[in-house]
Amino acid sequence: MRWKPTRTIQVEDRRGQGGMGGLGGVRMGGLGGGGIPIPMGGGLSGIIIVIVIVAVMFIMNGGLGGGGGTGGVTGGGGGTIESLDPEDDFGQFVNTITVDVQSYWEREFQARGESYPETVTVMFTEQTQTGCGFASAATGPFYCPADGKVFLDEGFFGELRTRFGAKGEFAQAYVIAHEYGHRVQDVMGTMDRVQSQQQSNPSQANELSIRLELQADCYAGLWASEVWRHPDDTAVESLTDQDIADGLNAASAVGDDRIQEQATGTIDKEAWTHGSAEQRAKWFDTGFRTGTLASCDTFAVATP
């Protein structure tokens, strides 16, 4: 993929500000009870469970606060930085993808006569505090609806590449685009509707979570489709066939079945919260091939 640094800054840099000793994981104050157990030292082995706990369990317990689903954020927040070191490859890349993805969604919302409230990607190391509680490096990337921000540990992409074989820059871009898919779901009220359905029918909570995650994969595919169809128009200038293959591989790599098998050697479909490797790749590909928001209605199909 070809991309270029942008002067627009949509990241909040907390790297090197970790060391909130002994926190050990995500502690969800909004849940009104104890913390949520996070597998430590396992990197990606806990990500599938962790992300849905942060992004969905928080919602189920009323953590969204006021109505409208905007996560309480209309801009970047006080921690946004004014410039990035030109030699900071990680920061430049994350910022470029963030700006490009959000620019895409701004255009999509404008076409619908609506507005998309920009937010930021928080880059951190070790651990950091969020509106959803404390996040550690073992948490994995996630979107927190309480403060409307995407959180990304700097070491995550290394885990994605070395432990799960998801190589290439676009594999990393897919992860960020997926999390911004959750941002879009929050703004559009999808998370609120899922919350209501989960509360009225708890037995379907995991199934609804899977559909939510697969839709975020499809939304990532929509952004990729836009870059593919309109090269050189944005900060991410173009994609290749190999980039799309890397994106599909990354989507498969973080499927519930792949994560479970890598972590325990067994597969328990009843515990799935994000969808299988096949499902995740399928919905990213659906968004990429169609390029239409309507094609991403994972809640309308009998089997996602």
Image (tube, helix red, strand yellow):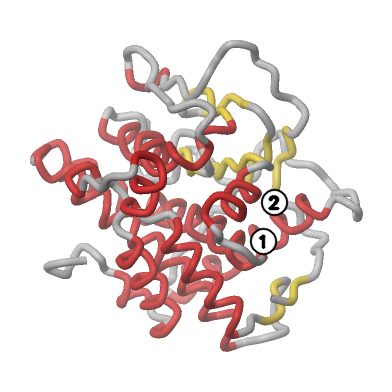
Query: Measuring 75% from the left and 53% from the top, which residue is drawn there?
Result: 9
Write down the residue under mark 1: 99
Q: Quadrant of residue 176?
A: bottom right
Q: Quadrant of residue 234?
A: bottom right
Residue 10 tag number: 2
Q: Quadrant of residue 54?
A: top left
Query: Measuring 55% from the left and 44% from the top, which residue is drawn there?
Result: 150
In the picture, measured across the screen, residue 16 lies left or right of residue 179, that is right
**Picture quarter with the C terminus:** bottom left
**SS class of the residue under badge 1?**
helix
**Picture quarter with the N terminus:** bottom right
Say whether marks 1 and 2 touch (CB < 8 Å).
yes
In the picture, measured across the screen, residue 37 lies left or right of residue 97, that is left
Residue 194 visible somewhere in the drawing: yes
Q: CA distance from mark 1 to mark 2?
A: 6 Å
In the picture, measured across the screen, residue 77 lies left or right of residue 16, that is left
Nearest the viewer among 37 and 66 is 37
In the picture, measured across the screen, residue 243 lies left or right of residue 179, that is right
Residue 256 at what x, y percent from top left?
A: 33, 51
